Image (cartoon, grey):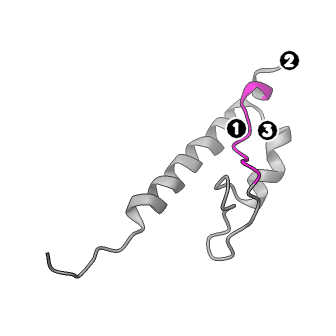
């Protein structure tokens, strides 16, 4: 067994691509990243996982607009 096969896919079986972002709503990968996962080596898989963390962080915190409401 090679090491890259030990890195589990981030897929959670919610496979729907957001047309605005191009990311899967379940795993946050792009179509190309999803297609390449099976043949990707350890380095490529770790890079993809790193990108997913950044995307989630932006979606959860950085991409939100601040409210204009007053306390």
Q: Quick one: label 3 or label 2, which is nearer the N terminus? A: 2
**For this rendering, which residue is in front, 37 or 41?**
37
Q: Quick one: label 1 or label 2, which is nearer the N terminus? A: 2
Measure the C-alpha gap from mark 3 to mark 1: 6 Å
Residue 46 in the image: above or below residue 51: above
Identify the residue shown where x is 68% and y is 55%.
Answer: 29
Quickly name the residue at label 3. 40
Residue at the extreme top of the image, as rendered: 1
Give the structural element (helix, strand or loop) at label 1. helix
Q: For residue 1, which numbered disc appears in the image?
A: 2
Image quadrant for the C terminus? Answer: bottom left
x then y, percent, for residue 1: 85, 17
Residue 21 in the image: above or below residue 60: below
Residues packed near mark 1 inside 10 Å, few (<14), some (14 to 19) or many (20 plus): many
Mark 1 touches mark 2? (CB < 8 Å): no
Q: Quick one: label 3 or label 1, which is nearer the N terminus? A: 3
x then y, percent, for residue 50: 56, 42
């Amino acid at each position: 067994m090679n090491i890259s096969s030990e890195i589990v896919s981030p897929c959670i079986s919610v496979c729907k691509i957001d047309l605005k972002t191009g990311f899967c709503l379940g795993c946050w990968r792009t179509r190309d990243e999803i297609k390449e996962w099976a043949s990707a080596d350890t380095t490529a898989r770790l890079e993809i996982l790193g990108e997913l963390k950044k995307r989630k962080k932006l979606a959860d915190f950085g991409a939100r607009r601040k409210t204009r409401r007053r306390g």
